[in-house]
Image (cartoon, rainbow, N blue to C red):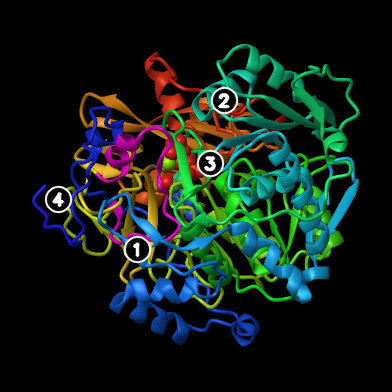
Amino acid sequence: MTRQKKTDAPAPTVPASCNAPETRATMRGTIDNLLVEERVFRPLPRIAAEATVNPQDILAARKHADADWKGFWEEAADELQWFRKWETVVDETNAPFYRWFSGARCNIVHNALDRHIETVNKNRLALIWEGEPGDTRKLTYFELYREVNRFANVLRGLGVKKGERVLIYMPSLPETVIAMLATAKIGAVHSVVFAGFSSGALADRIEDAQPRAIVTVDGFYRNGRVIPLKPLVDEALQHCHSLVEAVVVVHRAHLDVAMHDDRDRWWHDVMLHQPTEALTEVVEANDPLFMLYTSGTTGKPKGIVHSHGGYMVGVHRTLNWVFDLKPTDIFWCTADPGWITGHSYVIYGPLMAGTTTLLYEGHPLYPEAGRLWSMVERWGVTILYTVPTLIRMLMRFGTQYPAGHDLTTLRLLGTVGEPISPEAWVWFYKNIGRGQCPLLDTWWQTETGMIMISPLPVSLLKPGSVTKPMPGIDVDVVDEQGNSLPPRTGGYLVIKRPWPAMMSTVFNDHAAYVDMYWSQFPGWYFPGDVARKDDDGYIWIQGRADDVIMIAGHRVGTAELEAALSSHPAVAECGVIGVPDEIRGEVAKAFVMLHDDLPPFGGYVQADDMETELMEHVRRELGPVAVLKAVEFRKELPKNRSGKIMRRILRAEEFGEDVGDTSTLEEGPFCLR
Ligand code: ATP
Ligand code: MG
């Protein structure tokens, strides 16, 4: 690579190892821009009138950050409480192992909980929880504080020490939040494992994380069934080497589970008589807060480590910028606590902001497709932050369900996790937001910890674009040499400056951290996605670098092909991969799920006719470069449990190859079907 380094940070001390991910093979050439989407949605006067951050503020913030990014983040850090201030805003001496707020002493739980007890937030609702059967629980900040303290005392009593891991294998329950905060409060490190994972996937994570204790639940409710969980912990522990000395079991589903005398304890037993006060451990800003595995969309999940100081600053700042929180908000992010969005924007972000966060245990379609809308109505939800896969699924049920509920409390909508097609964007905006709520498409990753590219409520919106980087974030689209690309030319998305909530490392594998994220463009972070800018500097994510398809010399991102396909009224879901072609080298093959309520093959007599129709549709939408060679109709598509389409599995199936790590493949009760 010939590009000069833009940062004066010295080279990493950890050498790149040889296990470079597949991405490298595809890092050639730029990416074509085929999709033309010209709809724009101007800022809504009502939103602009109540906005804390207006367009001038955004401009001023960008200017400030570009002139003095360290000072910019320092100001953000000053909005939180610290036991001792930092010596350096960001210590770059061992880059890319950046140390944010180096030397500072803090604890995120002090900001998420303890400090609220001294303010009017004390008696505000921190959590509203709804179980799938309809049972509910509410906790004020004071109540949550006391529960967290009690469980912090439990963990200390069980011998869990600062820096040790506590694995939390739980669905969305109040106890999940309590266990996470209690772990962080004592300076231990939580590792939440999604409750939809099998005992095998759990065993792998136990082996890797080596937790001292596990917190789990007898079982929980999902899609009208009781799903036992504790037996999976027993099974996993039998099949791995571990340090686990204690398993604490929450009693949720009245299941009669086997308890090992010397190891297992009921949550309600250990909590009994615990003092409601507990000391908050003072940690250094770079001490680890949690580790969490990525979604496993492109390969084996990576154990991403985040630390207290930088993470709390980044999450706190972005939540306030993007969702412009008001004291009256009821914030509902539908993500599971087992994913990063659950960590940052269900739990830590809303609690640091002193807002009320809503959690739901169950399946979004139980007992019927109006469940989400009845919850929005029942709790008066003001901000709804969700994922494209859920939006696509709800679209399949039409507008009758949302139309049957009062959704007028909603003021902002958000989405994250995958490119959202313009069609899905407009559907959500019109039918859920009634054209009155800005839809904020937020781009970020487990690794980034916080939202990186996103509109703010007062931004001009373009369906399918994540718009612009957050103030303080320096994002560019470059070719493989690192040269900035002009508008309408796709390339590699890079982040040119460190940011506070960035991951600290890959758990137990520092070399992988350097190798996977910092070796492609030395000095810059490479997230693995491809994107383009438009003439207004708006960013459009084109897909994953690994998934780019080369058609007759043109490189095409999967997001554009999939967006074009899903704009066809018969298409419910789709995934596109590249397949060899004698003439063009490679062409696209689509795997398509049609809408349920259509006759077979979308009303065409033959699958072939529907296939031809879709091929022509894509060509009409994107032009002659977008050659779809074949369409395969499927009843289901392989998705992972955060709902993302796994193209690598489609590819492996197509070519009869080994499918690799499937631990996150969606199946069982968490299926969004
Ligand atoms: P793995 O890294 O294990 O393959 P993953 O990348 O799906 O899994 P996450 O950290 O959950 O794990 O997801 C981050 C990725 O999700 C981003 O790199 C990007 O590809 C995609 N993504 C997130 N938000 C958006 C968005 N708003 N628009 C487009 N893509 C998005
Ligand atoms: Mg990823």
Disc 2 CB within 8 Å of nearest ligand 1 atom? no
Residue 139 is at least partly visible in this image: yes
Residue drawn at x 26%, y 49% as measured from the top left: 31
Q: Which amino acid lies under the numbered mark 1 shown in the image of this protein?
A: Val
Q: Which amino acid lies under the numbered mark 2 shown in the image of this protein?
A: Ile
Above or below 385: residue 165: above
Camera-nearest label, 2 or 3: 3
Residue wearing tag 1: 90
Horizontal placement of 333 versus 136: left or right?
left
Q: Do the residues labelled 4 and 3 touch (CB within 8 Å)?
A: no
Residue wearing tag 2: 206
Tell whether position 507 is magenta: yes
Nearer to the camera, 503 or 472: 503
Return the disc, 1 or 4, that comes first in the chain's sequence: 1
Distance between the Cα atoms at labels 2 and 1? 32 Å
Q: In this picture, which residue range is highlighted in magenta?
A: 491-518
Q: Tag 1, which secondary structure?
A: strand
Q: Tag 4, which secondary structure?
A: loop
Distance between the Cα atoms at labels 4 and 3? 40 Å
Residue wearing tag 3: 163
